[in-house]
């Protein structure tokens, strides 16, 4: 008889033992001498937050010169701008995020909306201090505090990305599923979910550990007219409850009670007017107003479409001087956990995310988010 799933998979206890063993090695070497120890994950277990209240949001991209001459360095030979794929992803070298003028930041907001993700190489961003990084983020919108995630010791707003042997989440995922690929738009369950988001990596495995973004605008455009029309009239439920429940199950602290929102399935970008699919396998649970089987079938179709459209995606390789900025309103993304977290040679993957909140989503014909 074939072994049951429980017999095949390592148990949590086994994974923990493995992790604890390796952790001691990490503790000895890395936590003592790791250059970015001040960014290692911690969990504040005392601070709780009330539910977020509605707030005004004005996208900086609305203030930009449409030709974007300052962020594209049109008059600066030191700036190199490369399209990573035709429709999604642009790479910029020769500019420091930490030195951008407001004019450049406004144009950057527009560029991120248009290209989905913009990757900056050769950055000193992580070295300018937590306060200045926060200030940079705040220029684009109110900073999000993750309801359950780890953060850096001096800032709850810096959501920690950490996959070493002492973070079992992805390791468990890879042992229980065929793939760790998990496209999502960050915390899309929020009533005013994120717009521009920045990710900085500090430690990168010797090979792998890339991130893939997929264009939800391209995903929308590829649909046939009857399906577009159907989806444009619908809202879908995005829920933060499963995340909070699994955090509680794992004994982690929940700093804000979970919420759910009903967002338009097709979202209109406030600056570009571009339409994009706004559902993702991470947080979207059902389409409102449809029978269960109908909702399940349509979401399955859309999730498959999003996940398998390599021709609407860009895969970015990291180093410790790279900062990527994306627009969560028009893209979904997934970490690629293709390296062995238990192998000391392959190493640690560590970084942090600063997430700015955007507008209450608006769909076609003014269809608004409700909750
Ligand atoms: O680690 C990554 O590549 C992406 C993690 C992620 O989903 C995020 O920072 O929002
Ligand atoms: Fe994410």
Image (spheres, rainbow, N blue to C red):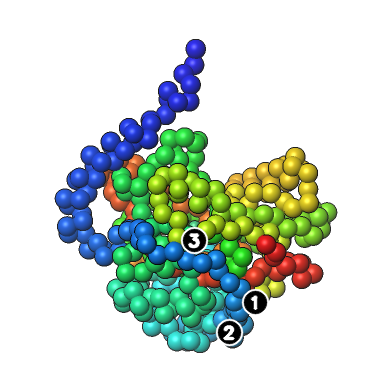
* Label 3–label 1 contact, CB within 8 A: no
Residue 255 left/right relative to 38: right
**Whether the residue under disc 2 has CB within 8 Å of ligand 1:** no
- Label 1 and label 2: CA atoms lie apart by 10 Å
Residue in the foreground of this view, choosing between 46 and 19 = 46
Residue 79 left/right relative to 286: left
User: Residue 202 placed where, x, y %?
Assistant: 32, 62
Q: Is residue 195 above or below residue 132?
A: above
Residue 276 left/right relative to 35: right
- Label 3 and label 2: CA atoms lie apart by 35 Å
N-term-proximal mark, 3 vs 2: 2
**Quadrant in the rendering for residue 370:** bottom right
> Can you tell which mark lies on residue 271?
1
User: Residue 359 placed where, x, y %?
Assistant: 62, 73
N-term-proximal mark, 3 vs 1: 3
Mark 3 crowdedness (10 Å alpha carbons): few <14, some 14-19, many ≥20? some
**Quadrant in the rendering for residue 264:** bottom right
Mark 3 or mark 2, which is nearer to you? 3
**Which residue corresponds to mark 2?**
64
**Whether the residue under disc 3 has CB within 8 Å of ligand 1:** no
- Label 3 and label 1: CA atoms lie apart by 30 Å
**Can residue 348 be seen at all in this image of the molecule?**
yes
N-term-proximal mark, 1 vs 2: 2
Mark 2 crowdedness (10 Å alpha carbons): few <14, some 14-19, many ≥20? many
* Label 1–label 2 contact, CB within 8 A: yes
Please report the residue visible at 62 percent of the width from the left and 57 percent of the height from the top: 260
Q: Residue furthest top?
A: 1
Please report the residue visible at 50 percent of the width from the left and 36 percent of the height from the top: 178
Q: Secondary structure at mark 2?
A: loop
């Amino acid at each position: 008889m074939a072994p049951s799933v429980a017999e095949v998979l390592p148990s949590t206890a086994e994974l923990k033992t493995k992790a604890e063993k390796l952790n001691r090695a990490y503790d000895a070497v890395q936590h003592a001498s790791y250059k970015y120890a001040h960014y290692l994950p911690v969990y504040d277990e005392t601070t709780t937050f009330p539910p977020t209240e509605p707030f005004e949001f004005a996208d900086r991209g609305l203030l930009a010169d449409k030709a974007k001459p300052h962020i594209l360095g049109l008059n600066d030979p030191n700036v190199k701008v490369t399209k990573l794929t035709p429709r999604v992803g642009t790479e910029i070298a020769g500019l420091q995020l930490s030195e951008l003028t407001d004019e450049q930041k406004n144009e950057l907001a527009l560029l991120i909306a248009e290209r989905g993700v913009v990757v900056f190489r050769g950055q000193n961003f992580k070295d300018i201090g937590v306060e200045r990084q926060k200030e940079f983020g705040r220029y684009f919108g109110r900073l999000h505090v993750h309801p359950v995630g780890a953060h850096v010791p001096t800032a709850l707003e810096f959501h920690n990305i950490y996959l070493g042997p002492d973070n079992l989440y992805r390791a468990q995922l890879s042992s229980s599923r065929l793939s760790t690929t998990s496209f999502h738009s960050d915390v899309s369950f929020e009533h005013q979910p994120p717009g521009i988001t920045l990710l900085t990596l500090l430690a990168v495995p010797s090979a792998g550990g890339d991130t893939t973004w997929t264009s939800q605008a391209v995903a929308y455009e590829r649909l046939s007219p009857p399906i577009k029309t159907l989806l444009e009239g619908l809202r879908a439920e995005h829920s933060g409850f499963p995340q909070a429940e699994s955090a509680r199950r794992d004994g982690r602290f929940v700093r804000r009670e979970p919420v759910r929102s009903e967002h338009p399935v097709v979202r209109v970008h406030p600056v570009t007017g571009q339409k994009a699919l706004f559902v993702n396998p991470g947080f979207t649970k059902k389409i409102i107003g449809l029978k269960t089987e109908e909702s399940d079938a349509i979401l399955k179709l859309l999730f498959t479409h999003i996940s398998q459209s390599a021709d609407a995606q860009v895969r970015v390789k990291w180093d410790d001087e790279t900062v990527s900025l994306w627009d969560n309103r028009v893209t979904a993304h997934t970490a690629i956990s293709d390296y062995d977290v238990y192998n000391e040679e392959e190493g640690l993957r560590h970084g942090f995310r600063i997430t700015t909140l955007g507008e209450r989503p608006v769909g076609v014909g003014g269809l608004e988010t409700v909750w």
